[in-house]
Image (cartoon, rainbow, N blue to C red):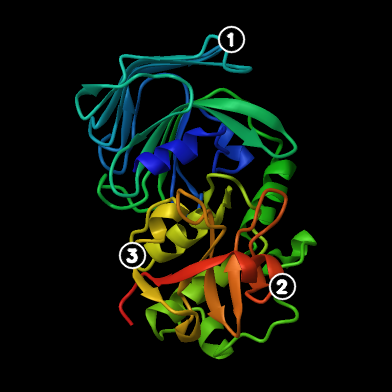
């Protein structure tokens, strides 16, 4: 977990929500990015569970920013006495009286607090929205598993100071984030056109069965063309390499850490000649373990989220950079 914290705090995280998520004072979104509940000025309690997921005593908006008081998340697991998020930048932002599980937590910008095997809290996070500038989120909770009593992938965004985008811009952003296999419309090369998928009918079938690995590949290929975002772990905001594999396997009930160096130890070792679809392949050796990974899909190819400026795509293990930088492979499921 310490490695996860170091990696995530090494640079500003990208907010894994669409620009439209920056419109309200607080929001709850499901794993697909769909809005579950939104709070405006005043008190708020989430309706679905009587306020267990999110509630606060009061909130207000002004030209300076947004303020909230008495904020309780996940039944009080996370609590903040007061939050203020400026309309522009981090100057003057604060979270006071922040506790997690009854313990006081320093509320410095980009502080990351683990909340479970795959869940975490980020404090005063700069929210980078491509083409639209940035804003700040007071508290962001990401449920990577069900230990918080939330559906895996759910996000709570508390303290949103930026105005919502015009409807036509919201629609465009949603389209670019959610076209699944149709995301080749990004104009980016996803590597799919020149590759014949193994067992293609199985992998492409919306409700297909097959091995766990085949199911994982089928899920991963839905996100071809989704932009790479450092720290990203969902298709709405983007993926980084370990975020993609973590998100895919979470849908199959297999929990992985959001860090490549950890995932390298979260499964059985597989020699190169025994690779099967769904195996995780690792590259870029370092003293901290491998620093990049992808998911093997068969035929000497793997799907990956490569780097900033690129998209989720299919690549070949025979490409020199991957052939020489190959570290090993892991199977995170029982064959």
Which numbered disc, 1 or 2, marks the residue closer to the eye? 2
Q: Position of residue 203 (x, y in %)?
A: 53, 82
Q: Nearer the viewer, residue 130 or 316?
A: 316
79 with respect to 177 (left or right): left
Q: Position of residue 35 (x, y in %)?
A: 49, 45
Q: Position of residue 188 (x, y in %)?
A: 77, 62
Q: Could you say whether the residue bearing mark 2 is in a helix, strand or loop?
A: loop
Q: Position of residue 197 (x, y in %)?
A: 61, 85
Badge 1 or badge 3: first in the primary sequence: 1
Report the residue marked by disc 2: 191
Q: Nearer the viewer, residue 201 or 288?
A: 288
245 with respect to 135 (left or right): left
Quarter of the image for the C terminus: give it.
bottom left
278 with respect to 21 (left or right): left
Report the residue marked by disc 1: 64
Q: Is residue 281 visible?
A: no
Residue drawn at (50%, 14%) of the image? 93
**Residue 254, which numbered label?**
3
């Amino acid at each position: 977990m310490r490695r996860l914290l170091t990696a995530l705090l090494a640079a500003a995280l990208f907010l894994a929500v669409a620009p439209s998520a920056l419109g309200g004072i607080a929001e709850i979104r499901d794993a697909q990015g769909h809005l579950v509940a939104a709070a405006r000025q005043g008190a708020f309690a989430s309706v679905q569970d009587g306020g267990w997921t999110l509630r606060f005593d009061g909130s207000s908006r002004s030209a300076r920013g947004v303020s909230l008081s008495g904020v309780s998340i996940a039944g009080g697991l996370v609590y903040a006495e007061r939050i203020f998020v400026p309309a522009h930048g981090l100057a003057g932002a604060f979270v006071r009286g922040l506790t997690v599980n009854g313990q006081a937590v320093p509320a410095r910008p980009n502080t990351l607090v683990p909340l479970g095997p795959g869940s975490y809290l980020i404090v005063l996070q700069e929210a980078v929205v491509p083409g639209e500038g940035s804003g700040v989120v007071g508290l962001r909770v990401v449920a990577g598993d069900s230990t918080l009593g939330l559906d895996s992938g759910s996000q709570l965004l508390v303290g949103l100071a930026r105005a919502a985008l015009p409807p036509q811009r919201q629609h465009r952003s949603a389209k670019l984030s959610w076209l699944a296999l149709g995301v080749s419309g990004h104009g980016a090369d996803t590597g799919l056109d020149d590759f014949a998928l193994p067992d293609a009918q199985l992998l492409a079938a919306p409700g297909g069965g097959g091995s766990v690995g085949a199911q994982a590949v089928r899920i991963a290929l839905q996100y071809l063309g989704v932009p790479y975002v450092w720290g990203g772990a969902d298709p709405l905001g983007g993926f980084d390499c370990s975020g993609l594999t973590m998100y895919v396997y979470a849908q199959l009930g297999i929990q992985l850490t959001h860090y490549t160096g950890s995932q390298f130890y979260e499964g059985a070792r597989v020699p190169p000649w025994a690779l099967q679809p769904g195996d995780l392949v690792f590259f870029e050796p370092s003293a901290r373990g491998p620093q990049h990974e992808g998911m093997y899909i068969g035929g000497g190819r793997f799907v990956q989220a490569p780097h900033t400026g690129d998209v989720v795509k299919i690549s070949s293990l025979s490409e020199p950079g991957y052939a020489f930088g190959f570290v090993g492979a892991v199977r995170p499921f029982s064959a």
